[in-house]
Image (cartoon, helix red, strand yellow):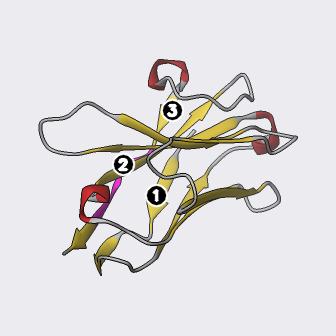
């Protein structure tokens, strides 16, 4: 399995970005997908997750009301729409895939990871 994250960049505070994660392989609908982020000197932090078939979503409190996670099982992709961005959202964003099809916040339950895409929010 390979995950390719894209869509990061530099944006001013209050702006928006849409991250995408494309997954290789088949049976994408069986897998739970998540977005995490990591800033220098900090641990990887949960952002959002979505389950495989029923599309149940789970968001970190810090991004509720601003970020939305979605997926397109026909295209093997998952998206993270980020609105009202803040400087504290600056991080490398990683997508992860978990084999049990669930949505959750523990990075230990994700078996595959993409390479990350950098999001920088200027004040």
Magenta segment, which residues?
Answer: 114-119
Residue at which label 3 appears:
112
Q: Quadrant of residue 97?
A: top right
Q: Quadrant of residue 89?
A: bottom left
Q: Name which of mark 2 and mark 1 comes first in the sequence.
A: 1
Which disc number belongs to residue 29?
A: none
In space, the residues marked 1 and 3 are separated at their CA atoms by 12 Å
Name the residue rendered at 19%, 34% in the picture. 42
Q: Name which of mark 1 and mark 3 comes first in the sequence.
A: 1
Front-lying residue, 17 or 26: 17
Q: Position of residue 120 (x, y in %)?
A: 24, 67
Q: Give SS at disc 2.
A: loop
Quadrant where the image shows the N terminus: top right
Q: Position of residue 109 (x, y in %)?
A: 54, 19
Name the residue rendered at 78%, 39% in the picture. 52
Which disc number belongs to residue 115?
A: 2
Q: Position of residue 72 (x, y in %)?
A: 76, 60
């Amino acid at each position: 399995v390979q995950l390719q994250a894209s869509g990061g960049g530099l944006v001013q505070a209050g702006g928006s970005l849409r991250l995408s994660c494309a997954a290789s392989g088949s049976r994408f609908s069986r897998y739970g997908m998540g977005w995490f982020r990591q800033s220098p000197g900090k641990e990887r932090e949960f952002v959002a997750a979505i389950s495989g078939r029923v599309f149940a979503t789970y968001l970190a409190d810090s991004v509720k009301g601003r970020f939305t996670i979605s997926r397109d099982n026909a295209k093997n992709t998952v998206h993270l729409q980020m609105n009202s961005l803040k400087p504290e959202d600056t991080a490398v964003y990683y997508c992860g895939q978990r084999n049990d099809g669930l949505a959750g916040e523990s990075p230990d339950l994700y078996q595959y990871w993409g390479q990350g895409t950098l999001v920088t929010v200027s004040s």
